[in-house]
Amino acid sequence: MSKLWDKGYKLDETIERFEIGHDLAFDNELVEVDVYGSIAHAEMLNRIGILTDDELQTLKQGLGRILDLYRQGQFFMTPADEDIHTKIENFLVREYGDVGKKIHTARSRNDQVLVDLRLYAKAKILELESALLQCAESLVEFASKHEHVPMPGYTHMQRAMLSSVGTWAGAFAEALLDDLKLLETAYELNDQSPLGSAASYGVPLPIDRQYVADKLGFAKVQNNVLYAQNARGKFEALVVQAISQIMLDLSKLAQDILLFTTAEYGFFTISDSFVTGSSIMPQKKNLSMMELIRAKANMALGYQQQMMSVLSGLPSGYNKDYQETKKPFMEAIQLALDSLKVAELTISNLSPNKDKLLAACTPELFATDKAYELVQQGMPFRDAYRYVGTNLDKLEGADPEESLKKRTHIGASGNLGLSKLKESISASKVNVDKKYSHLMETWQNLLS
């Protein structure tokens, strides 16, 4: 198989295997976006007179065939293929002759892989946003359904103050909606076309970078050709950093669910179809998927660190080191997608045990409530605090549900603002669907 950089000599096989590394598997995921990028590039070459109309149609036909073969599972990378760019160009040359050799005019594999990763990132970020919103929606629905179900609130792992199931679930919904903003920022930065930057320094041809950007559905051209290449890995790392924040929130959610479903707490239960057993202990029912989410959060942090470590201290221009950011980038995305879907499914099938929750709302949870009752009667807070603290043995409980409803300030159990969260989620879902539909329509137009 001929290499795009072929100069008449053969690369040592050990060196070749080492340089390709894990790229084969991940390049298979880039076939579709590489085809779109190549069609847009070919149309631009036709626009500036490098390709004739007939040559353009031939290349579009060939690239369309590649896409069809890929979707049928018949076009994929093998160890004989250097990378996806080589495989596609070799296919075009083999099937259509010299016109296939023209597709790479004014383009380097450097900006080709950059545009592939940007297009891939745009589609995947929108998938992540959709999965995140679905998970947040499940949390809000859970919070609404059990809004005033009492639940102990904890600090330092000890019972602290009265809280509610609605407060607990709503907290995670709001956390995910904050994480959504990070994904939106990552999307905006990835929504820049690097095509035309070539090997970091542009090309001595009158290419139309804006035309290609428009054809591919990018919001703008990434202006400086050197920065386009310097941003390799940086923009992908921003996606992984957003993912790390999502996974931090999911790890806390997972840990809470693991804790609150133990026999010692018994606050929540879940269907047997979500638990695994033990090979030795007949009674065991394990929420293994929550343990895996907890572990995967650390993996996401590891992916982030891998990418930042590779990028740190690199000189300007393309460096082969960038190849090592592809694996953690793509694996982190899949990890987050899977985790969000599992978390959403878990929340949708979680049930509070109201009796257990009420039994856990013991009198000490109302100590602060009692202190504020004395404050409202005119006693200074510090005196009220000491009085209650030295008379805990006389403390009596109160009606938990009534106490929850008295907490009426913004964000408290009696005023969680869940309707606003629902409105925000609905609006965001519409926005994500609109962007995704536009992106798919833009790419589909390239095939017409």
Image: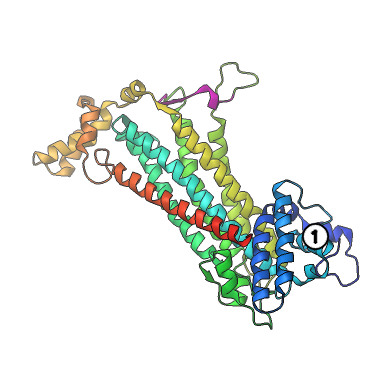
Tally the marks: 1
Q: Is residue 217 visible?
A: yes
- Mark 1 surroundings within 10 Å by alpha-carbon count, few (fewer than 14), some (14 through 19), many (20 or more): some
Compared across the picture, whether 404 is left or right of 313 comes to left
Residue at the far top: name it: 282
Task: Report the front residue among 114 and 402.
Answer: 114
Compared across the picture, whether 429 is left or right of 119 comes to left
Q: Is 271 inside the magenta-drawn segment?
A: yes
Q: How is the image coloured?
A: rainbow
The magenta segment = 266-276
Q: Secondary structure at mark 1?
A: helix
Q: Is 283 inside the magenta-drawn segment?
A: no
In the rendered image, residue 172, in percent from the top left (x then y), is placed at: 40, 42
Task: Report the front residue among 124 and 278.
Answer: 124
Query: Residue at the location (45% across, 39% down)?
Result: 253
Placement of the N terminus among the 4 image quadrants: bottom right
Residue at the far right: name it: 9
Compared across the picture, whether 60 is left or right of 329 comes to right
Task: Report the front residue among 334 and 109.
Answer: 109
In the rendered image, residue 342, in percent from the top left (x then y), is placed at: 53, 37
Does residue 184 lie above or below 174 as drawn?
A: below
Query: Residue at the location (18% across, 37% down)?
Result: 371
Amino acid at circle 1: Phe
In the rendered image, residue 275, in percent from the top left (x then y), is placed at: 55, 26
Q: Which residue is mark 1?
A: 91
